[in-house]
Image: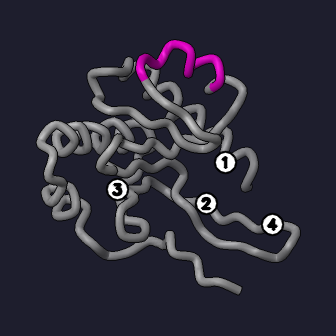
Amino acid sequence: MAKIKTTQTKVSVTKFINDVPDETKRNDSFRIIEIMKGVTGFDPKMWGPSIIGFGSYHYKYESGHEGDMPLVAFSPRKPAIVLYIGAGEKNEELLKKLGKYKRTKGCVYVKRLEDIDVKILKEMIKESVKHTKSLYK
């Protein structure tokens, strides 16, 4: 079985963010840390080489594959900031009010924090944590 790459590391979150070349993305990342920490109550930790996660949960699939993942996370990638916030019925409705973003199944991509409604983002983070905890007790 392949080794999971997205595991918690001891790398400094602050150093990682300070190495982000784009100043806006760097400043937005520090603000997202404040937001996610404030909503979840968890300190940021590096997961893999480029994901900043908050809290964790253990999953186990029927196939026997299992591991740990952050409850919520984000990554300041070159094209956009990737928000790893889980699904949930309420988040589908909240996305309509979030602002300017792109989306894939488990990720929300934003260019700048100013493009979205931070109050809605906080609600989405709260809903994501609640939804994930309900699935993985």
The one of 51 and 120 positioned closer to us in this rendering: 51
Q: Amino acid at mark 2?
A: Tyr
Looking at the image, residue 55 lies above or below residue 83: below
Any magenta on residue 60?
Answer: no
Q: Main secondary structure of the magenta part?
A: helix
Image quarter of residue 134: top right
Query: Which is more N-terminal, label 1 or label 3?
Result: 3
Image quarter of residue 68: bottom right
Any magenta on residue 96?
Answer: yes
- Residue 61 is tagged as 4
Location of residue 125 in the rendering, given as x and y in whole percent from the top left corner = 50, 35
Res 129 seen here: no
Residue denoted by label 2: 57
The answer to whether mark 2 and mark 4 are in CB contact below 8 A is no
- Residue 37 is tagged as none
Tell me which segment is drawn in magenta: 92-100
Q: Secondary structure at mark 3?
A: strand
Report the residue at 23% width, 68% height from top: 12
Q: Which one is closest to the eye, mark 4 or mark 3?
A: 4
- Residue 133 is tagged as 1
Location of residue 90 in the rendering, given as x and y in whole percent from the top left corner = 66, 23
Report the residue at 58% width, 77% height from top: 4
Q: Secondary structure at mark 1?
A: helix
The answer to whether mark 3 and mark 1 are in CB contact below 8 A is no
Q: Residues within 10 Å of mark 2 (few under 14, many from 20)?
A: some
